[in-house]
Image (cartoon, helix red, strand yellow):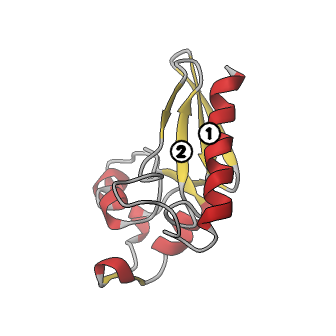
Amino acid sequence: MINTHWHFDHTGGNENMGKADVIIVAHDQVRERMSHDNFIKAFNKKVPTSPKVALPVITFNDEVTFHLNNQEIQVIHQDNSHTDGDSIVFFKTANVVHMEEFHSEIPPINWTPNYNNLGVQNDQKIHSLYQSV
């Protein structure tokens, strides 16, 4: 299972999945944030430390590639898109990208610090994935 960022609506099922011995994969920052209490200002919500069984067991810094069922699947970190641990999932063989909350109904400009620069760079990075297939 891949956590595309650390927010509770994306990691809330991790504990049950971990207890079922499902391998959880995420960016290094996802595990880091889940390892201690956090506060999400936009929701005025405290997020408690996750149980150890809920933490990702495979983490990566820039990207990781899986070769499963004749598919090449890349999980790629996106700097400061929605959180500091965002990832997209690129199913290279199928030429499909899952972008999680990379762009949402809320205009992304200034959603996170430096979005104007990093967000555009992330958009360009995703666009280049499609051109590489």
The residue depicted at 62 percent of the width and 63 percent of the height is 116
Q: Secondary structure at mark 1?
A: helix
Q: Nearer the viewer, mark 1 or mark 2?
A: 1
Query: Label 1 is placed on what type of residue?
Result: Ile
Secondary element at image label 2: strand
Which of the labelled discs sits on residue 126, or is there none?
1
Q: Which residue corresponds to mark 2?
A: 88
In the rendered view, would you say 15 is above or below 58?
Answer: below
Earlier-in-chain disc, 1 versus 2: 2
Question: Residue 88's x, y, as percent?
Answer: 53, 44
Mark 2: few, some, or many residues within 10 Å (few <14, many ≥20)? Answer: many
Seen at 43% across and 44% down, the residue is 1
Nearest the eye: 63 or 103: 103
In this rendering, is residue 90 above or below 23?
above
What's the amino acid at mark 2? Ile
**Marks 1/2: CA–CA distance:** 9 Å
